[in-house]
Amino acid sequence: MAEKTEKRGRKPLPADKKKPPQETLKINDFILPFVKKLKGNLKNKLVTENTLSQLFDVLDGKYDQQSSMFKSPETVKIVNELQEKIRVLEAEKQIIKDKLIKNKDIRLNLVQERDNWHLNAVQTKNELENLKSSYRLLKNNYSELLNPEHVCMAIKANGERCSKKAKLDVNQNGIMIRVCLLHAKRFEDHVVK
Ligand SMILES: [Zn+2]
């Protein structure tokens, strides 16, 4: 079976005749109409290389556009239009710059606010810890009040409260508790005399 030759579309160029990839230029949408117009005028020979260089001189601020350099009203018009567009672009650039500065300020404020809240949270946590230890102290005092018979306040290995009669006062981490003689051994160094 013979191979079908493709007849549609454009034939590819032979390898030695292929053109190198062309350089592309991205043009700001805002000045695109102007560039198109300039390109058209260049094509129609309405603008010479000389006019172009003069035009750039004016854009660079080297010449006064009202000077005798510009006899063609078309060129003066193009320069005026381009200068106006550049002025608008500069104004837009300034607006964007101002917005960026404003955003930076807002970000800084947010960071400060976050830090303040963090500090606040740390302080609250400390206060909570203080309250917790006050609560533990009160709880110990309370159980002492509940046990006027002075039952040993130590906790046995099985987690239950020792029920022997308390004989001695011991200092357990700054809190005085009453314990039986057996449990007092555990606190030998802390016996309050
Ligand atoms: Zn005990």
Image: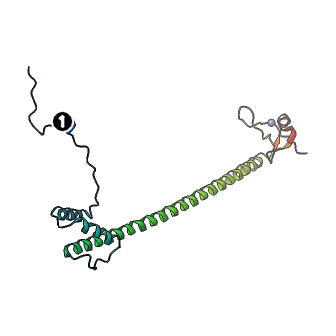
Q: Is residue 104 left or right of residue 43?
A: right
Picture quadrant where residue 93 is located: bottom left
Q: Which quadrant holds the N terminus?
A: top left
Q: Which residue shows up at 13% across the image and 37% down it?
A: 11
Dot 1 falls on a residue whose secondary structure is: loop
Give the class, few, some or many, for how many residues have Cα within 10 Å of label 1's Cα (few <14, many ≥20).
Answer: few
Picture quadrant where residue 156 is located: top right
Report the number of discs.
1
Q: Which residue is mark 1?
A: 14
Q: Is residue 17 left or right of residue 161?
A: left
x and y percent of residue 73 in the render? 20, 76
Q: Colour mode?
A: rainbow
Type of the residue with mark 1: Pro
The residue lying toward the viewer, choosing from 59 and 108, is 59
Picture quadrant where residue 87 is located: bottom left
Q: Which residue shows up at 49% across the image and 61% down it?
A: 107
Task: Mark 1 and ligand 1: say if the CB distance to the nearest ligand atom is below 8 Å.
Answer: no
Q: Looking at the image, in which quadrant does ligand 1 appear? A: top right
x and y percent of residue 39 in the render? 20, 62
Q: Is residue 164 left or right of residue 93?
A: right
